[in-house]
Amino acid sequence: MRQTVQTDRAPAAIGPYSQAVKASGSFVFTAGQIPIDPATGELVRGDIREQARRVLLNLAAVLEAAGASMNSVVKTTVFLRDMDDFAAVNEVYAEFFPASPPARSAVQAARLPKDVGVEIEAVALLGD
């Protein structure tokens, strides 16, 4: 089973991809979320903490639309424009995953969509 997920509480896809895909009735795989405010369609241009907070709020909205939550996330990948931002992003990330955080990878990317500072994708369990 494969079902695409779309919500207007997170930015619309800016290319040929889905915000998330439910698979086999057990998992949801999200697209990478970037710091776009879904209410305005504008990028959040604040510091990296503000960008990370918006990214994680967008991720939470996509997961909720799929029938999951931040508590059901089992794996994330964090893409950073600059690895020097890791500590600041980590502070905000910890607010969204205060206990039993998911497995995570963090990598520095040469360039992210729309030249943002951070992008995060997730895999979560459904029905949790």
Image: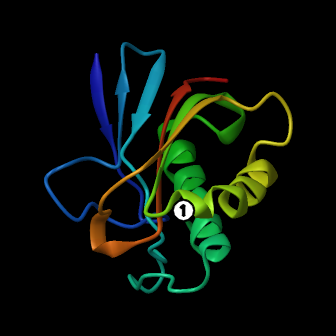
Left or right side of 16 for 8: right
| Residue 121 sits above or below residue 75 on the image | below
Residue annotated with mark 1: 55
Q: Position of residue 36 (x, y in %)?
A: 44, 74
Residue furthest out toward the left: 16
| Secondary structure found at label 1 | helix
Q: Quadrant of residue 67?
A: top right
Residue at x-position 51% and y-position 82%: 44
Residue at x-position 20% and y-position 48%: 17
- Quarter of the image that includes the N terminus: top left
Q: Position of residue 101 (x, y in %)?
A: 74, 32
| Residue 97 sits above or below residue 39 on the image | above
Q: Quadrant of residue 23?
A: top left
Specify few, some or many for label 1: CA neighbours under 10 Å numbering under 14, 14-19, or 20 or more: many
Of residue 59 and residue 95, the one placed in the foreground of this image is: 95
Residue at x-position 78% and y-position 49%: 94
Residue at x-position 58% and y-position 85%: 46
Left or right side of 117 for 74: right
